[in-house]
Image: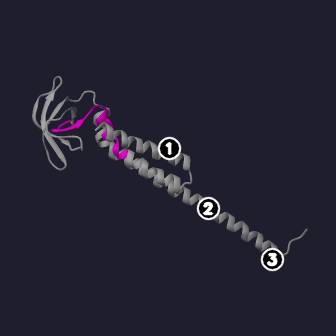
Amino acid sequence: MKRSSSQRAALVGRRTALVGRRTALVGRRTAMGLVALVLLAAGVWSSWGTAHHVVLAQGREHGTLTVTECGEETCTGRYEPDATSAARARVTVERSVAAGKGDRFPVVVKPGTDVVVRTGVPGLLRAWMPLGGAMVLAGFVIGGGLRMPRTAWGVGTAGAALLAATFVAL
């Protein structure tokens, strides 16, 4: 059966439209996948600046910080070493909601500075908090842009659980 030229043109037009839709779908999925990947990479990058002092704490100076005063962004206090490091009269730590005058908690000293990072479970959770926020945001991108609701719920819930655990631990 032979097709007329108008039928062939209509068939070619439908195929072209189908290819265009598929290309747009692949483009959208690729773009949204890259956005989700960038969000997660940024969360890891911003968390790792503090987290590596907690995760890779072996060989660093460990001790206890006694908070003496808190400003808007940092708290200061006395550092009492656990073993071979020297005591310091004044070190600073990033302020958290839970830190107040007189509080004591374990810390590790950033090499070459008088800045300390909280260790233990609360310190580890606090260090990974930016990743938790990035996971929540990436969950929306995965669900809406990639149309992958189960994966989105998993990523978003894991991020929210990390944020909630940080809130409880601190």
For label 2, count other residues whose C-alpha is less than 10 Å away and answer few (under 14), some (14-19) or many (20+).
few
Q: Is residue 62 left or right of residue 139?
A: left
Q: Amino acid at mark 3?
A: Ser
Q: Write down the region rendered in magenta.
A: 111-131
Q: Amino acid at mark 2?
A: Thr
Furthest residue toward right = 1
Cα–Cα span, label 1 and label 3: 50 Å
Q: Position of residue 162 (x, y in %)?
A: 39, 41
Q: Amino acid at mark 1?
A: Gly
Residue bearing mark 2:
23
Residue bearing mark 1:
154
Ranked by sequence position, the earlier of labels 1 and 3 is 3
Cα–Cα span, label 1 and label 2: 28 Å
The residue at 55%/60% (across/down) is 28
Ranked by sequence position, the earlier of labels 2 and 3 is 3
Residue bearing mark 3:
6
Q: Could you say which quadrant of the image residue 30 lies in?
A: bottom right
- Give yes or no for contact between labels 2 and 3 (Cβ–Cβ under 8 Å): no
Q: Position of residue 54 (x, y in %)?
A: 29, 34
Asked which secondary structure carries label 1, the reply is: helix
Quarter of the picture holding the N terminus = bottom right
The residue at 19%/49% (across/down) is 73
Relative vertical location of residue 89 with respect to residue 44 in this rendering, above or below: above
Furthest residue toward top = 83
For label 3, count other residues whose C-alpha is less than 10 Å away and answer few (under 14), some (14-19) or many (20+).
few
- Give yes or no for contact between labels 1 and 2 (Cβ–Cβ under 8 Å): no
